Image: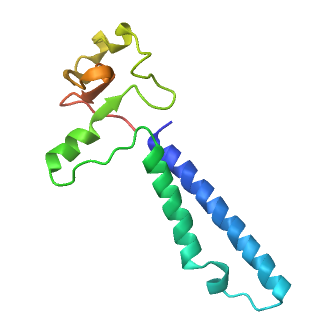
Amino acid sequence: RSDFDRVQDQFGLALGHLQHAVQKTIRRVFIRQSKPTPQTLVTPTSTSILLITTYETFFGTYPLSQVFDQTNPLTQTVHGRKVSCLGPGGLTGRTASFRSRDIHPSHYGRICPIDTSEGINVGLTGSLAIHARIDH
């Protein structure tokens, strides 16, 4: 699954919570027998709080999300071309074998064999080669 699918799922959950909050407000309005208006059903604070907390929890706790430097456009480009075997459903730095860290012949021309992280994640994260492209 792509990261976009995971973000879409999280915001789908947030919209489900918003729907529940609106239904709860509608019930309250009909119990009080007052006239419902869009402003009373969906308050800006409830909407923004739900979406902001969903955004913060997803990007703050998701293991593959990172905050990158926005002052250098080159680092943004390099960061966008990173590939990783880590994350949900992937390997971990402690359990990965030497075989999974080695360069496979199918990597040539696709993944740069030189650019990899240091330390425990060596060989598990890399960069796309210069002319490599990802098909969508």
Q: Could you tell me which residue is drawn at 21 percent across and 27 percent down?
A: 129
Query: Left or right of 124: which side holds 38?
Result: right
Residue 34 drawn at (x, y percent): 78, 91
Q: Tell me if 75 is positioned left or right of 32 in this view.
A: left
Its colouring scheme is rainbow
The quadrant of the rendering that contains the C terminus is: top left
Image location of residue 130, percent across then percent down: 18, 31
- Please state which of residues 90 and 120 is positioned toward the viewer in this rendering: 120
Q: Residue at x 54, y 78 (%)?
A: 44
Residue drawn 40% across the image and 38% down it? 64
Q: Which residue of the protein is positioned furthest toward the top in this rendering?
A: 99
Q: Is residue 98 left or right of residue 15?
A: left
Q: Residue at x 29, y 34 (%)?
A: 82
Q: Is residue 58 above or below residue 27?
A: above
* Residue 57 locus on image (x, y percent): 50, 52
Residue 12 sits above or below residue 127 on the image: below
Location of residue 29 by image quarter: bottom right
Q: Quadrant of residue 14?
A: bottom right
Give coordinates of residue 37: x percent, y percent: 68, 88
* Between 4 and 27, the one nearer to me in the picture: 27
Q: Is residue 133 above or below residue 113?
A: below
